């Protein structure tokens, strides 16, 4: 220390979070800096740890269902779908076609709301104030549909093991189609604000690059993987809930930088609208609940089921010992696994890019910490 | 839906078929048709030991692995269409590596553990693998006794780093050779491993709670 002068570059340790608006919750990142350059990071997580997996072992299968909504709370419906599919697989039942179509509609709508929260806050972090108001305005319309359907806007508990509890309300199809018609031009509007914006491009292009091989190495999935050029989406690769009956594209890009991830997510919102329109057409009258025993007691066994959540592969590994309560429920959270790649994405970059990269990873701390 | 409406609308014509989903629920609801379910219940008691009704799994991949690892592979099975291998603890990492390099299982989805306190080998470590090119999932399971330090998988898959840290945090399984084995979700000074079965759901590290939160109990 004594020999160093003011011209020497010295390392500085900077604490970012847990109360920092751009960390999207209670994430603490310890940054090792050399001037503005990031040398390394260490994530401190767990501030929101509630022991969800432990709770599962002390609840019945049906009682645990609402808890999963509270992990990724901006995409609660996807969480519920994954859990219901896992228990249904253990019971060896399948939801009836009408229930599956309603599930697809609500899950895709939820993908849009999740991406809207991402877009609004990500743009806000970069310095674009306007999009967040637009995004939340449209998100409100989608939340109204959730509220009309099941009474809740965020932690919806929309699905039950075996299908649905509630039949759709009068005008459900009309409202969904109205949303679709209203929403597509809005995506163009967001793109008008951002896509060719010089500042947006300057802040995002070539920032936080993660190549396809690195994604696989770190287990990173979802839009981050697709932006790196891997055309992989669980809805196509291992279809569930009748996704194989719908026509849609898997948007991909090549560079794997923050800008590409933006492009992929924007396209995904358009594809979600496309799926919803087809699902509304498929919505034929029929039962909404499979024959599931009143007391859910799956045979001894284990199952791993994963779905394409808005953030990536969301998996449930459920072990049954034949009793009323799950013996073990392991949640494979996409946010947790994706966050691990943060260090690789920001090391060598600038400190301002850390904010952009955390935003583009689209993490939800409720899911990281569980 | 039509099925469900029938018994309510016309009680007499259909009862035997209607109760098939759950005979016990029917009996509890006071349906006088207790006679048919009872023999079934009486026949049930010679319970087979509750084990997973898995069927053997045979494929080119399995034969290839068996040729290579022989006795190290204890079981290859399928349950509900999902394939899994049970291997000896020492073979887990070489098999992970072989699957990654030779068979393209390049994506380690998850590492987790299950606690079976009554079994001599208390912890079951579960590695879930996926291959993009084959579009296939495989689970690799191995059982280890309490205190055993299984080798880390970080050398094969980088993503194992945080996943193993979480297993260590929740179960107290120490991975030998892990580059950075610290607690990840709980505070570093926390005592106890919450996902072990002998850790009650109300239990907590009371000293930690008192010292750091200044309250008697977190409950």
Image (spheres, rainbow, N blue to C red):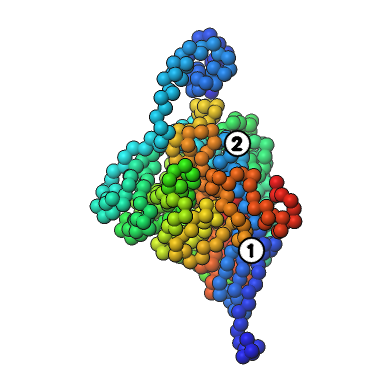
Q: Is residue B197 visible?
A: yes
- At a point 33% along the width and 45% down the height, the residue shown is B75
Q: Which residue is mark 1?
A: A28
Q: Position of residue A284 (x, y in %)?
A: 52, 30
Q: Secondary structure at mark 2?
A: helix
Q: Nearer the viewer, residue A128 or B197?
A: B197
Where is residue A251? Give x, y as percent.
Answer: 48, 55
Q: Position of residue B112 (x, y in %)?
A: 48, 51
- Helix, strand or loop at label 1? It is strand
Residue farthest to the left, as pictured: B67
Chain letter of the residue beneath label 2 in the structure image: A
In the visual, does A235 lie left or right of B194? left
Quarter holding the N terminus of chain A?
bottom right
Q: Left of A30 or right of it: where is A91?
A: left
In x, y percent, where is residue B68?
Answer: 26, 55
Residue A7 shows in the view: no
Q: Residue at x 67, y 56 (%)?
A: B208
Which image quadrant for residue A276?
Answer: top right
Q: Which residue is mark 2?
A: A63
Q: On screen, B48 above or below B135? A: above
Q: Is residue B215 above or below residue A212?
A: above
Same subunit, labels 2 and 1: the answer reads yes
**Disc 2 to disc 1, C-alpha distance:** 32 Å
Residue at image point 55% right, 27% down: A294
Q: Which image quadrant for residue A259?
A: bottom right
Question: Residue reaching furthest top?
Answer: B12
- Chain letter of mark 1 equals A
Nearer-the-camera pick, A280 or B30: B30
User: How dense is the environment of label 1, judged by Cα within 10 Å: few (below 14), some, or many (20 and up)?
Assistant: some
The structure residue drawn at horizontal position 42% and vertical position 57%, both measured from the top left corner, is: B150
| Number of residue marks | 2
Given residues A242 and A188, the one toward you in this image is: A242
């Amino acid at each position: 220390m004594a020999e160093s002068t003011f011209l020497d570059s010295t390392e500085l340790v900077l604490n970012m979070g847990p109360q920092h608006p751009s960390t999207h919750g209670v994430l603490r990142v310890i940054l090792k800096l050399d001037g503005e350059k990031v040398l390394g990071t260490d994530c401190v997580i767990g501030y929101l740890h509630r022991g969800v997996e432990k709770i599962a072992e002390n609840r019945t299968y049906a009682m645990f269902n609402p808890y999963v909504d509270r992990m990724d709370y901006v995409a609660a419906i996807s969480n519920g779908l994954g859990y219901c599919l896992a228990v249904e697989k253990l019971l060896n039942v399948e939801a009836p076609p009408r229930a599956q179509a309603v599930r697809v509609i609500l899950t895709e709508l939820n993908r849009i709301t999740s991406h809207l929260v991402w877009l609004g806050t990500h743009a806000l972090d970069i310095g674009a104030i306007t999009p967040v108001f637009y995004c939340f305005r449209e998100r409100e319309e989608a939340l109204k549909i959730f509220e009309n359907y099941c009474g809740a806007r965020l932690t919806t508990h929309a699905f039950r093991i075996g299908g649905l509890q509630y039949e759709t309300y009068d005008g459900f199809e009309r409202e969904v189609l109205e949303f679709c018609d209203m929403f597509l031009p809005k995506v163009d509007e967001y793109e008008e604000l951002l896509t060719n914006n010089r500042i947006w491009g300057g802040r995002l292009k070539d920032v936080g690059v993660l190549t396809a091989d690195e994604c696989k190495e770190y287990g990173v999935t979802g839009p981050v993987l697709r932006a790196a050029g891997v055309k992989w989406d669980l809805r196509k690769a291992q279809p569930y809930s009748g996704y194989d009956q719908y026509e849609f594209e898997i948007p991909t890009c090549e560079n794997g930088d923050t800008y590409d991830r933006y492009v992929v997510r924007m396209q995904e919102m358009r594809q979600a609208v496309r799926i919803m329109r087809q699902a509304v057409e498929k919505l034929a009258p029929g039962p909404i609940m499979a024959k599931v025993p009143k007391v859910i007691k799956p045979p001894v066994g284990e199952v791993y089921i994963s779905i394409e959540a808005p953030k990536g592969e969301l998996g449930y590994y459920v072990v049954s010992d034949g009793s009323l309560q799950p013996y073990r429920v392991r949640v494979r959270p996409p946010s947790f696994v994706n966050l691990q790649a943060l260090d690789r994405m920001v090391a060598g970059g600038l400190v301002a890019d850390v904010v952009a990269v955390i935003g583009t990873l689209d993490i939800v701390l409720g899911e990281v910490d569980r | 839906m039509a099925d469900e409406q029938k018994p309510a609308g016309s009680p007499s014509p259909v009862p035997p078929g209607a109760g098939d989903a759950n005979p016990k629920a029917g009996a509890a609801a006071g349906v006088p048709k207790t006679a048919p379910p009872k023999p079934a219940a009486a026949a049930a008691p010679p319970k087979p030991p509750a084990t997973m009704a898995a069927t053997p799994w045979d494929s080119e991949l399995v034969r290839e692995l068996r040729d290579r690892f022989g006795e190290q592979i204890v079981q290859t099975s399928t349950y509900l269409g999902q394939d899994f291998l049970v291997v000896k603890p020492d073979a887990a990492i070489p098999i992970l590596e072989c699957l990654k390099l030779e068979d393209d299982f390049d994506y380690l989805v998850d590492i987790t553990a299950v606690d079976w306190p009554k079994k001599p080998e208390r912890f079951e470590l579960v590695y879930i693998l996926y291959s993009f090119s084959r579009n296939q999932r495989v689970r690799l399971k191995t059982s280890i006794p309490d205190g055993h330090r299984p080798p880390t998988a970080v050398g094969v898959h980088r993503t194992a780093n945080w996943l193993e840290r979480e297993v260590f945090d929740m179960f107290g399984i120490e991975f030998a050779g892990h580059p950075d084995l610290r607690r990840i979700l709980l505070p570093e000074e926390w005592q106890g491993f919450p996902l072990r079965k002998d850790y009650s759901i109300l239990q907590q590290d009371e000293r930690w709670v008192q010292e750091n939160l200044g309250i008697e109990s977190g409950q």
